[in-house]
Image (cartoon, grey):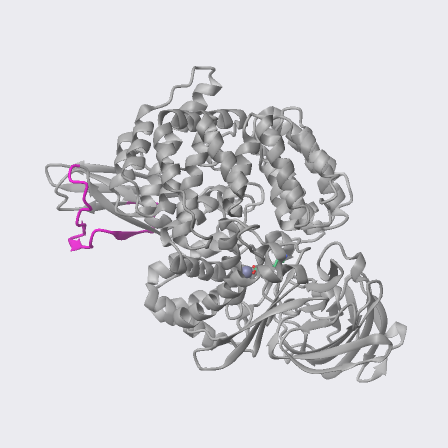
Amino acid sequence: PQPVYLSDYQPPAYRVTHAELTFDLDPANTRVEARLTVERHPDAAADAPLYFHGEQLALESVAVDGETLADNAYRHDDRGLTIARVPAAFTLETRVRLAPEDNTALEGLYQSNGMYCTQCEAEGFRRITFYPDRPDVMAVFRVTVIGDAEREPVLLANGNPVERGELEGGRHFVTWEDPHPKPSYLFALVAGDLECVEDSFTTASGRDVTLQIWVEAENLGKTDHALASLKRAMRWDEETYGREYDLDRFMIVAVNDFNMGAMENKGLNIFNSAAVLTHPDTATDAAFQQVEGIVAHEYFHNWSGNRVTCRDWFQLSLKEGFTVFRDQSFTADTNSAALKRIQDVAFFRTAQFAEDAGPTAHPVRPDHYIEITNFYTLTVYEKGAEVVRMLKNLVGWEAFRRGSDLYFARFDGQAVTIEDFVGCMAEASDEDLSQFMRWYHQAGTPEIDAHGEYDYVNAEYRLTLRQRTPVTAGQQAPEPLHIPVRMGLIGTRSGHDLSLTLGGEACGKDTVLDLREAEQTFVFTDVAEAPTPSLLRHFSAPVKLHFPYSREDLAFLLTQDSDGFNRWEASQRLAMLALDDLIAAHRNGVEKVMDTRVIEAYRTLLNAPEEDRAVLAEMLRLPSEACIAEHQPLVDVDAIHAAREFVRQSLGFALRDEFMALYQASQSAEPYAPTPAQIGRRSLKNVALEYLMAIEDEAGIEHCRAQFDAGHNMTDVRQALTLLVHSSRDDLSAPALRAFGEKWAHDPLVMDQWFSIQVSRPQGDVLDRVKYLMEHPAFSLTNPNKVRALLGTFAQNRINFHRLDGAGYALLADTVIELDGLNPEMAAGLLTPLTRWRRFDDTRQALMQAELERINERSLSANVYELVDKALG
Ligand code: B3K
Ligand code: ZN
């Protein structure tokens, strides 16, 4: 497979302005007729051949302006259709056949549980009909769907229904029109036996919009939260960005087989059922929060993505980075802002940092790819969102909002680039953002080495920041970035934020330093007492910041920092210092001793608790093994696990009574609601229970059992089940697992949780269990949620996946090979942990590399080929 380069971009020689499609649905033999109004680009040569994409299509006929072409008048290969000579403007008609029932890749038109649905982003539309399947071709669509009146009573497509009727042989049809020109990747069609929950929303300008969530009948009781989230998101986008919805109806459909979370098709969002269905009995708080975030994200795309879209797929972060930033802001505004930031940053620093440090590292805007599906990454999405967040902080919200208004007004209905977006921000703010643009071009996580000196005599504090960006594959020498470092100075004696004076100017008690050079020193004057700096508040830039904090400094910041995010940060740094020592002790075979300063810091926290209980819970939570690994030069899987367990147990023993008191004080009989207050309380209670179970405290075990048996809500049940199953005691684990499995055998989303709880346990029998569960009737290799729940979770189970006999790697590789023939996108996703092989010890490196080579010997999809090639390269 050949790479595509950003620098090769050419506008299309022919574009489509109107698309009229007819689908006559059949599982094995769907007929698709397309009637396309085509125009030659004014700059294209009169003899430019026409080339439209098309893959896996059985072509039956081609006609130009009503004249059927002879076989030798066009060329059809496995990538597309070429017609040597066409008029400057004409109508192209094609007829093709497809077999949705055989489509296990879940791209294009496929079947899930018997219903028809589509996934076209990025390049799935070419598996539906011949078309210039690129985002810079925007057309008005009119779509007729014909189906069986009994099997497919519901026939949906984008826009508004304009006609419907009965046909012979028990068939019926509905015709839909979408007045907004759109790229093909936003096309959608759904047909099946679905029911809907309906509501309405009145927009700011007073238009009524019909809202519908379509599900299979048994899921009708699980849509309330998604619907309420949708309405909140619609209101928020009006109030915050001045963006109003632009069609008479907005539909969401839940499907079981879906490669990712959801898809923002115009007016007809298609969702993974896991990203839309919730019920207190079946979904955890985390799932409720995720549903709210994803519903909002897809809705926000209606403007950031659909009305203004991407010129080409290199610009993917234009819509994704901006939309993730928008959904994060929405969640922060509607829930606990500090909690949201903590959760996002904890995830980002674990997962995106790992990507940025590995063989698949790429800039927020990549400059080449082999398979675009591989670039729906944490870098494009989450780092892209961090870059937009920095932009907002740099120019300030008012200018950012003016820039956003300008962007939507100037580029409405167009397909544009990241430069267009940043250009609007520069124009609206009058800032020079040219250095800032490097964030889009340079891969790798920048590191800042910071050190400070207090000068008593002159009452000065000198803070020196030195930045470096590591060289990643295929990158030139990185240049210094423009890095906003938000910070404050806290008086070490007084415990108060000090007023800051920089270059003679007063700048409040919290300021942003603009680091632009490789090294810069900031001199604060009139610093009355020795300060402890609070740096990178709110994670003001996606960097690693090193500062030689002592444990005393961190224990101080843990309670004294006025910035809630950095109080949490202090807890993580403190835990990390203790963990580092214990990891070293484990490696050197030295007895492990728990640092009492850390215990005392936790005791202080537990006795003078944070007001935001959810934030306190996050402060009490230790960094995950994956997060710890990101801090190690070479990952020692066993030492990390042992050290973390040791800290958990030491804290459990030392603070047993405090945790017990906290657990008991956090009990409540309130009916379940996914409110921030309740979520915080449950989170704190369940952290306390985790520490009690870490030491297998008898009273703790009784609480855990009781919490499981009470079955009050899935958040509490799942945590109790996890702790029972992850305990060393089979008499706790086996009965709970059995009871849960029997109770929920009918509910696929709950069974996903049942799978992942079992294969994330630390015991050594996990590999066999994965193999056994792969044969379980509820498991299926063609369902992405199941694959993620079982194999994806297993690959995150660090001590078991990284077994020294290599059996974990071999199982993953076998599964990748099998899955590649069914669903390349999923296969590539599953492969990712193996690509990080260089981070481990020699033995594991050799084992992982051997599995990558074994995969590489196969004939592979472009998806898997590209990843393996980079990993081995
Ligand atoms: N835009 C889709 C992702 C499509 C992924 C295609 N492999 C969902 C989202 O980001 O909103
Ligand atoms: Zn998105």
Left or right: 578 with respect to 861?
Answer: left
Residue 436, image quadrant: bottom left
Q: Name, please, the residue furthest toward the left.
A: 457
The answer to whether 298 is drawn above or below residue 872 in the figure is: below
Residue at position x 62%, y 62% from top? 220
What residue appears at the point 14 percent right and 39 percent down from the top-left corner?
529
Instruction: Residue 840 in the image: state x and y as whole percent.
Output: 56, 30
Give yes or no for residue 143 being in the magenta stretch. no
In the rendered image, residue 625, in percent from the top left (x then y), is placed at: 50, 34
Q: Write the residue at 80% across / 75% down.
A: 94
Q: Nearer the viewer, residue 134 or 405?
A: 405
> Magenta: predominant secondary structure element?
loop
Quarter residue 313 falls in: bottom right
Task: State yes or no: residue 511 in magenta.
Answer: yes
Pick the residue in front: 513 or 182: 182
Q: The C terminus is located in which quarter?
A: top right
* Closest to the observer, 854 or 385: 385
Q: Nearer the viewer, residue 23 or 140?
A: 23
Span of residues in magenta: 493-520
Q: Is residue 127 left or right of residue 281?
A: right
Quarter of the rendering containing residue 405: bottom left
Image location of residue 122, percent across then percent down: 64, 61
Q: Residue furthest top?
A: 590
Work out whether residue 536 can be spotted: no
Does 52 sit above or below residue 385? below
Residue at horizontal 39%, vertical 67%?
Answer: 425
> Percent position (x, y) of residue 92?
77, 79
